[in-house]
Amino acid sequence: MEKDSADDPEFSVVIPYRRRLDTIRIVFESLAEQTIDLARLEIVIGAIEYSPEFIRLCQEFAGRLAITTVMSGGEWNVCRARNLALRQASGRVIVILDADMALPPRLLERLSSEYFAGEREVCLLGRAAGYDDTLIKSDTPAAAALAYSHYRQLLAELEAAGGVVPDLRDDLADQQVPWTLVWGGLVVLPAALLREHGLFFDENFTGWGSEDQELGYRIQAAGIPIELARTIYGLHLPHGRDLAFQEKFADLNQRYFLAKWPVLSVEAWRRFGWREVNVSYRDLELMLFAAESRSTTRRSSDGSRPTQRSLKSEPARICE
């Protein structure tokens, strides 16, 4: 595996960006308050727009944060935006972060001391505090309607409570299909693994949805453990949400995912959803193999040529 230079930063925080000026300011504030030596941190933005306002914002933080922005025109594509940033990242550990996720001050310190102290080869999944229906119903129309001190206080309260944020994925007693639990708001991965296995986002996904699960599928296929971390989280900031836009692309992207990887786990995820497939996937596998065995026996008894369906074996659980 390729070694990083001793001069490289420890962390590259990679953020896709377009028209999120109110939330990205708060994200920058939270990064500037990280307790690690900020010389160990770089921020790389993949921006699908040419925005003078965003450039001015970066200039405001120039004395506090090392920010590199790669700008491009064209239609919004979150995969392309992330890839623009990922290809410029030089840190030992990549933190893939959405532009609406503020981090608690000790998050990078915890990553360094508790999760990546050695050459640990793992994909770490973070949590999103507040990522539920209450955000859609919130009386706060935009993050910038409140001062950063408000979000600082919320993060301090979460930290005082132990820094363990409840997550929908906690409900699963047995995570049978780990890649389905890779949600792109906060994902951490060693840069060497990303480069070794080409773990960039597939830019054929359009609009919204499924691109993070497809990356998770390739992470799992590469044999990299996937771990839902208890104390790694961000605060999801309020913003408008276009549910019609999301629904428009959800099915299209799921169809593309299945066409690219036509295997049982992807088909079951698309049909039943992430929660149900993690509850019943092993039973589904057993039922399918039993049905194929009966079919093969019948074909053999009447002299016809047996057929077999090859299924990709996958790691069975998220590491705890």
Image: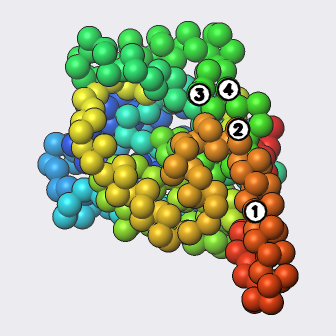
* Residue at mark 2: 279
Residue type (three-letter) at the residue carrying disc 1: Ala
Image coords of residue 283 (percent x, y): 77, 47
Residue 156 visible somewhere in the drawing: yes
Mark 4: secondary structure? helix
**What residue does disc 1 label?**
291
Q: Position of residue 49 (x, y in %)?
A: 20, 55
What residue lies at 58% left-to-right and 58% top-to-bottom? 266
In this rendering, does residue 120 appear at all? Answer: no
Front: mark 1 or 3: 1
**Among the two numbered marks 1 and 2 on one chain, the one whose residue lies closer to the N terminus:** 2
Real-space Cα distance between discs 4 and 3?
6 Å
Q: Do labels 4 and 3 touch, CB within 8 Å?
A: yes
- Residue at 80% from the left image edge and 55% from the top image edge: 286
Residue at image location 47% in from the left, 70% down from the top: 259
- Secondary structure beneath dot 1 equals helix
Q: Residue at x 38, y 12 (%)?
A: 150
Q: Secondary structure at mark 3?
A: helix
Residue nearest the viewer, comparing 313 with 61: 313
> Disc 2 marks which amino acid?
Val
- Mark 3 or mark 2, which has the lower sequence index? 3
Q: In which quadrant is the C terminus drawn?
A: top right
Q: CA distance from mark 1 to mark 2?
A: 20 Å
Query: How far apart in space, not on screen, are marks 1 and 3 (Cα)?
Result: 33 Å
